[in-house]
C-alpha cells in the first residue's frame, strides 16, 4: 500500500476507534456493572486507547512530515492536528489521570468531577482534531482524483 493511501487510511481508523470508545465502549460497562467495577473496566480501555493514540499520532506525524517535505514545506496543517491530538492524549490521560486517583482519595486541589470534565474535554478536542485530520486527508484525495 502506498504512503498516500496510509495517509488517508490511518486518520480514518483512528477517528473510528475514538468514536467507538466514546460512544460504545465506555458507556456500556456503566450500564451493566457496579460503578467501581465499571470504572476499572473503562480505565483499562482508556489506557489502551491512550497508547494506541500515541502510536497513531507518531505514524500520522511521520506520514504528514513526508507529505510536507514532498511539497517543499517543513510543517503542514496535518502535522499540527496530529500534534494537537498527541498533546491532548498526553495531558488528558498521562497528566490528569494521576490527579483523578488522588482526588478519589480526597487529595488535591480539584475534585474528581472537575478532573473528569477536564479529561473529557481533552478527549473531545483530540477527537475533533483527528476527525479534522481524516476529513482533510479524504478531501485532499478527492481533489487529486477529480
Image (tube, helix red, strand yellow):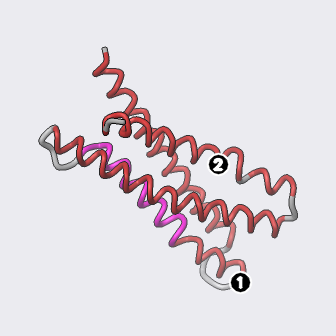
Res. 42 mark: none
Look at 46% across and 66% down and name the residue there.
Answer: 90
Nearer to me, 43 or 3: 3
Q: Is residue 93 in the magenta section?
A: yes
Q: Secondary structure at mark 1?
A: loop
CA gap, disc 2 to disc 1?
A: 27 Å
- 56 over 143 or under it: above or below: below
From the viewer's perspective, tell me whether residue 61 is left or right of residue 107: left
Q: Secondary structure at mark 2?
A: helix
Main secondary-structure element of the magenta-colored stretch? helix
**In the image, which residues are magenta?**
76-94
Identify the residue position indicated by label 1 in the image.
106
Identify the residue position indicated by label 2 in the image.
22
- Image quadrant occupied by the C terminus: top left
Picture quadrant of residue 7 = top left
Q: Is residue 11 in the magenta section?
A: no
- Image quadrant occupied by the N terminus: top left
Look at 57% across and 47% down and name the residue there.
Answer: 18
Q: Residue furthest left?
A: 72
Image coordinates of residue 127 in percent, x first then y, are 52, 47
Q: Residue furthest top?
A: 146
- 105 over 92 or under it: above or below: below
Amino acid at each position: 500500500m502506498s504512503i498516500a493511501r496510509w495517509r488517508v487510511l490511518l486518520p480514518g481508523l483512528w477517528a473510528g476507534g475514538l468514536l467507538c470508545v466514546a460512544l460504545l465502549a465506555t458507556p456500556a460497562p456503566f450500564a451493566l456493572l457496579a460503578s467501581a467495577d465499571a470504572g476499572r473496566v473503562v480505565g483499562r480501555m482508556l489506557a489502551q486507547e491512550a497508547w494506541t493514540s500515541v502510536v497513531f499520532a507518531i505514524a500520522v506525524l511521520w506520514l504528514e512530515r513526508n507529505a510536507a517535505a514532498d511539497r517543499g514545506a517543513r510543517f503542514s496543517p496535518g502535522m499540527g492536528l496530529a500534534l494537537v491530538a498527541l498533546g491532548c492524549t498526553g495531558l488528558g490521560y498521562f497528566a490528569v489521570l494521576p490527579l483523578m486517583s488522588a482526588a478519589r482519595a480526597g487529595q488535591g486541589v480539584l475534585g474528581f468531577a472537575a478532573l473528569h470534565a477536564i479529561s473529557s474535554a481533552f478527549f473531545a478536542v483530540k477527537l475533533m482534531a483527528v476527525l479534522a485530520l481524516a476529513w482533510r486527508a479524504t478531501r485532499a484525495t478527492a481533489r487529486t482524483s477529480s
